[in-house]
Image (cartoon, rainbow, N blue to C red):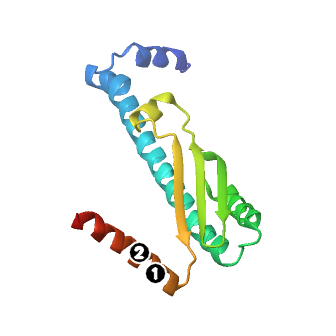
């Protein structure tokens, strides 16, 4: 007697599934997968935000102290560092201005997520931006400016 494999397969296919399993497979699993994907991309977003902020802090001090003459060197440094560190953010734009008394830096990048539903669940966070201003005055000049500002504030409130 020969073993009939197709007959056994037909019996397995005809067996009805439990209703709870069907609902779980159709509704609960996709919702839980979307929640897990949202948490994953939220962690990617936070990683990129921390990376952009850290690079901005590093580069602004380089621009303020060492690269006063050539601020484009600091921009190139920031773009080089960011090119390999960002996970999902693209199109990083670096703007650094360094002058005699201060330096300012702005880094922005566009966060990309694969599905619009994930963007909606994350609250449409689509841009990562970090801005820092640094004064490179010496201590005496900073105290003079601080005293002038405080005197001006006292004069305003004295009236």
The label shown at residue 148 is 2
Q: Is residue 120 above or below residue 19?
A: below
User: Image quadrant for the C terminus?
Assistant: bottom left
- Could you say whether the residue bearing mark 2 is in a helix, strand or loop? helix
Question: Residue 102: x percent and y percent?
Answer: 59, 69
Of 43 and 50, nearer the camera is: 50
The label shown at residue 118 is none
Instruction: Please tell me in which quadrant of the rendered image residue 34 appears.
Output: top left
Visible residue check, residue 79: yes
Of 101 and 30, nearer the camera is: 101
The CA span between labels 1 and 2 is: 6 Å
Question: Residue 41: x percent and y percent?
Answer: 48, 45
Instruction: Please tell me in which quadrant of the rendered image residue 111 appears.
Output: top right
What is the count of numbered marks? 2
Neighbours of disc 2 within 10 Å: few (<14), some (14-19), many (20+): few
The label shown at residue 144 is 1
Assess whether mark 2 and mark 1 are in contact (beta carbons under 8 angstroms).
yes
Residue at the image point whose x is 37% and y is 26% from the top? 25
Question: Residue 86: x percent and y percent?
Answer: 61, 54
Q: Is residue 66 left or right of residue 21?
A: right
The residue sitting at the front extreme is 159
Q: Is residue 60 above or below residue 5?
A: below
- Could you say whether the residue bearing mark 1 is in a helix, strand or loop? helix
Neighbours of disc 1 within 10 Å: few (<14), some (14-19), many (20+): few
Residue at the image point whose x is 33% and y is 16% from the top? 16
């Amino acid at each position: 007697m020969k073993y009939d494999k197709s007959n056994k397969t037909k019996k397995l296919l005809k067996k009805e599934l439990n209703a709870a399993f069907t609902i779980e497979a159709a509704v609960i699993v996709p919702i839980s997968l979307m929640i897990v994907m949202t948490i994953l991309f939220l962690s990617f977003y936070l990683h990129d935000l921390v990376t952009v902020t850290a690079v901005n802090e590093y580069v602004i001090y380089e621009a303020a102290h060492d690269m006063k003459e050539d601020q484009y060197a600091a921009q190139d440094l920031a773009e080089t560092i960011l090119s390999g560190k960002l996970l999902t953010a693209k199109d990083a734009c670096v703007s650094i201005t360094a002058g005699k008394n201060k330096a300012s830096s702005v880094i922005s990048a566009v966060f990309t997520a694969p599905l619009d539903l994930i963007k909606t669940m994350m609250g449409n966070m689509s841009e990562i931006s970090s801005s820092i201003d640094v004064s490179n005055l010496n201590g005496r000049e900073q105290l003079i400016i601080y005293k002038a500002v405080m005197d001006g504030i006292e004069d305003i409130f004295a009236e």
